[in-house]
Amino acid sequence: MKRLFLITTALLLSATAFAQTPDPLDRDQSKYATYSFSKDDQYTVETPYETVTVKQPKGKKVKNVIFMIGDGTGLTQWNVGWVANGGALNVDQMPVAGYSRTYCTDKLITDSCAGGTALAIGEKTKYGYIGINEDAEPVESNLQYAKSKGMKTGVAVTCRINDATPADFCVHGPSRRDEEGLAAQYVDANVDFISGGGTHFWNQRSDGRNLIEEMKAKGYTYVDKLEDIAGAEGDKFLGLYDEYDLGPALDRGPILMESTMKAIQMLDNKKGFFLMVEGSQIDDWCHRNKVGYACEELFDFDKVIGAVLKWAEKDGHTLVVVTADHNTGGLTLLKGSIEERTVKVHFSTKGHDGIVVPVFAYGPGAEAFSGVHENSEIGQIVKKLMK
């Protein structure tokens, strides 16, 4: 009887300890502890950030393209963020808006592979395909087309660099699961600026290769810390800041901002450049149905949009396009307050949905993105404007 009591007591204590173990996504010891993350469907912003004001440039020629993708970011995500930041976002400064239909050739509800590929190559493709058409043939992306014209190129993301969206623009393959294979293709991709995560697939590989050392041998300056981005020198840049994806926005710091502005500084030249920037983890937190984390990822992305717009305004020949590969979470804004910067939402799914996503444009050629488009048409328009 005594033994049964001890076993029962041990089980109860174990269950209690398990129940009290914090969800690692809650990051109780991180900077997020100062924010209201106690309820996944509600969020309040304590201190909103200031947004920029820009004027549409008068120039008509497109010299540079900055293609910005909020992964999983639909109309509601932008509206939720707008309310939570007190009724202001930098994306509001983009004078042209349209819509993009995101379905792929074999499924109504797409994934990031097919959705990003349509934007990158100007063709719809099959679910799971990266940089290839529905016949599994590699197709030149807008980034690769820009390179063929003598323009400099770059990608800056907050996911691992061999994940779907950056890979859609830089490499080719039939499956995102071939993560080592996709990473290896970057060695010969000749992308001038690469910034994101994923060192595991670069220097902890099953084939024993160290891709970081291979890239350094090709002249790339390698950076693995936020504080080293601004001072990096050279013509080619490789920044990998985490073993897999980067941490949440408030934990990782302004890596996307620093890397994007460093990319612009390094890539800007007489022949122009093509830069793809992704707010990768808006999608991740919508998958997890955590609105506070999703808002902070969106704010991180929108702050970069603001800095990009200010630079593009001064440059006068830069087209900036902001869109999404698909919508995630079936997000609905139920109630909230612009004045109190608070939102209450409902997620209807932990997956993607088929609702159209917005397209915003600024700079020369921006008017071409007005109206309703297939996602592949967005890629086609970008390529046409670079010719």
Image: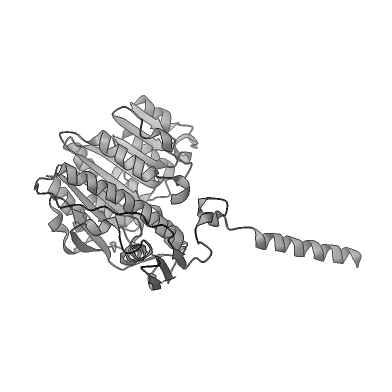
Above or below 366: residue 106? below
* Side of 242 relative to 371 (left or right): right
- Residue at 43% across, 42% down: 197
x 33%, y 27%: residue: 233
- Extreme residue in the right direction: 1
Depth order, front residue of 291/213: 291
Estimate the x, y position of residue 4 in percent, counting from the top left: 86, 66
Q: Nearer the viewer, residue 213 or 301?
A: 301
In which image quadrant can residue 21 be found? bottom right
Image quadrant for the N terminus? bottom right
On the image, the x and y values in percent for residue 69 come to 30, 53
Query: Is residue 136 visible in the rendered structure shown here?
Result: no
Which of the colour schemes (rainbow, by chain, secondary structure, one colour) is used? one colour
Question: The C terminus is located in which quarter?
Answer: top left
Whether residue 41 can be seen here: yes
Residue 130: x and y, percent? 32, 50
Task: Please report the residue visible at 39 percent of the width from the left and 69 percent of the height from the top.
Answer: 331
The quadrant in which residue 316 appears is top left
Q: Name the residue: 42% across, 70% down.
A: 345
Disc count in the image? Answer: 0
Q: Along the horizontal axis of the image, is 296 left or right of 61? A: right
On the rendered structure, is 108 left or right of 1? left
The answer to which image quadrant residue 336 occupies is bottom left
In the rendered image, residue 94, in percent from the top left (x then y), is placed at 21, 57
